[in-house]
Image: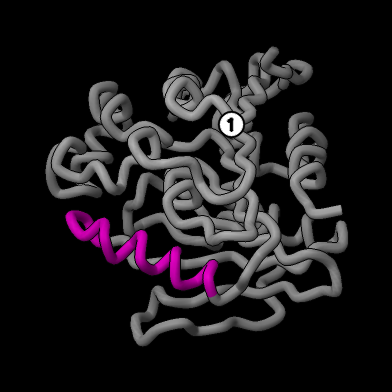
Amino acid sequence: MVPTAGPEVTVENRAVLTRPAPGPVRALRYGPDADQVIDLWPDEGPVVALVHGGFWRPEYDRTHLRPMANALHRAGYSVAAVEYRRKPGDPAATVADVRAAVGLLRPSVVVGHSAGGHLALCAAPAGAAVLALAPVADLRLAARLGLDDGAVTDFLGGPPDDHPGLDPARLPDPPGPVVIVHGTADGRVPVGVSESYVAAHPATSLVRVPGAGHFVLIDPESRTWPLVERELTALLPV
């Protein structure tokens, strides 16, 4: 049986994207490009790597995850927000960056939102669990749906069938456990995209959140946030 959560009152509330939040304690570079950087909020707790969304487009960066990063840091986690190159038509560089960054961090859990969920599913290292929040987990389906005005084709530089090694739905299971949290009222990435991934990867746990949209999953002020924290905690090693 697929677990569900309680209803979310606010659907597609984008306030978290521009809400002010403290910057990182320090930053770590993992390559020469300006986007090959990781923002760090270190602590003694488990390391959680955050991979931001934005449909792989260059205009969206890690800063919109700062409210989430600070909330997790206050909860006792050592938080790392990964930036990566976002050049349309060069998906290999994007995936390689995330793989390099999380390999350096050696996190307990990789948390990815939207396109960041796609990257987390592609790049999670051995020993790490994945918490994918409304992920673009099936590129063929996402392309057929025309998400964000052709974002998948723009990212790949061509049709998904030319890049099967970058499509989580066609890849083997990630090395660690995977939990997907997805709102049933998501207008950016429909929950059917996650359902398609789970059909191909039945070991994955899908948590549907009735009435929830796309951005409440990364908003510490939303009613869905306690569920996200609970699923994250459940993935940590005992």
Residue 29 pos. (x, y %): 49, 84
Residue 158 pos. (x, y %): 12, 43
Choose top left, top right, bottom left or bottom right for residue 128.
bottom right
What is the three-letter code of the residue carrying label 1?
Thr
Q: Can you say whether 70 is above or below 179 in the image?
A: below
**At numbered mark 1, what does the secondary structure look like: helix, strand or loop?**
loop
Identify the residue at image location x=36%, y=57%: 59
Q: Can you say whether 128 is above or below 166 in the image?
A: below
> Considering depth in this image, is 204 or 194 the residue closer to the camera?
204
Residue 196 pos. (x, y %): 42, 21
Q: Is residue 96 magenta?
A: yes
Identify the residue at image location x=35%, y=51%: 56
> Considering depth in this image, is 43 or 164 the residue closer to the camera?
164
Identify the residue at image location x=34%, y=81%: 33
Residue at numbered disc 1: 204
Q: Is residue 53 visible?
A: no
Q: Is residue 74 visible?
A: yes
Choose top left, top right, bottom left or bottom right for residue 95.
bottom left
Choose top left, top right, bottom left or bottom right for residue 110.
bottom right
Identify the residue at image location x=24%, y=49%: 155
Q: Give the residues drawn in magenta, as a range.
A: 87-103
Residue 218 pos. (x, y %): 64, 43
